[in-house]
Amino acid sequence: MTIEDVRERLKAAKRPIALTGAGVSAESGVPTFRGSEGLWRNFSPQDLATPEAFERDPQLVWEWYDWRRSLIAKISPNPAHYALAELERRSPEFTLITQNVDGLHRAAGSSRVMEIHGSIWTVRCTECGNSSENRDVPINILPRCSCGGLLRPGVVWFGEPLPEEMLYKAFEAASSTDLMLVIGTSGVVQPAASLAVRAKDGGALVVEINPEATPLSEVADVSFKGKAGEIAPLLVG
Ligand code: OAD
């Protein structure tokens, strides 16, 4: 199946969806998690991205998130983010599910975005549970809620459940889609990776964009081995 074939299928699709991962933001300059340059090469998820790590050393965890927020604040969406925003404008039923917390899909103009791992631009109170947007760069380390409680990053950490209702909607979208784009994810983190399997089982055409083979390449009907910023605009075209 060629790029042109998929472009035609995408034009005809009634309920296209996309699942994105860190690779969709790689060309913008956001580091991915796995691979030779990945964050998890140099940093330990156990020390930085678990509720236990935050309880043990909130200062260290906030310093790491502050560093990532400063890095992301300086960069812009790339052609892959813009292509997905265009797809939303064109397809009223389009749903975008992202594992990314960087906010670049929204910055590119996508509004129907399910951020299933949360957002680095939100904070949540560990006492009252209130969530709010916070774009301070740098952030005042050990930020406090108006109730006095310690604020934590509004992201999902290892060992934590994903937001239940959003996840339900994501699986619903995967069950009823006729074409799913899987862009820039290593496909090893659950339950996100199962969304592609659900779409496939429901009879959708599953199209992967990734320079490397992943476990989802086996699930996909076609894998374009290239960069998201180059291939996605050709498919949406
Ligand atoms: P990973 O870092 O695991 O995988 C990134 C994928 O992007 C790899 O398969 C790369 O080959 C691919 N890639 C790199 N550059 C690309 C490009 N220019 N275009 C397209 N693909 C490219 O990131 P995720 O799959 O998103 O979770 O990781 C899933 C979750 O694991 C993250 O959300 C995060 C992490 O631990 C939490 O923090 C809960």
Image (cartoon, rainbow, N blue to C red):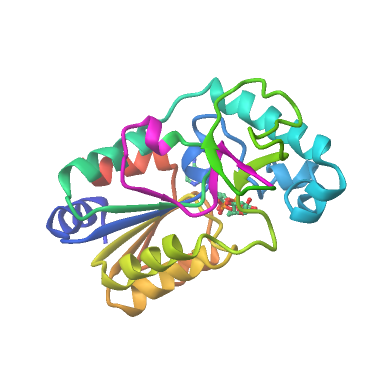
Residue 94 against residue 14 in the figure, above or below = above
Q: Is residue 18 left or right of residue 163?
A: left
The image position of residue 106, as x and y in percent, is: 38, 36
Residue at the spot 34% in from the left edge and 68% down from the top edge = 174
Residue 183 against residue 58 in the figure, above or below = below
Residue at the spot 51% in from the left edge and 23% down from the top edge = 75
Tell which of 229 and 109 is nearer to you: 109
Residue at the spot 62% in from the left edge and 25% down from the top edge = 71
Farthest front residue in view: 147
Farthest right residue in view: 56
Q: Write down the region rendered in magenta.
A: 105-126
Q: Is residue 219 left or right of residue 102?
A: left
Say which quadrant the N terminus sits in: bottom left
Say which quadrant the C terminus sits in: top left
Q: Is residue 139 left or right of residue 122?
A: right
Farthest left residue in view: 12
**Is residue 220 part of the magenta span, yes or no?**
no
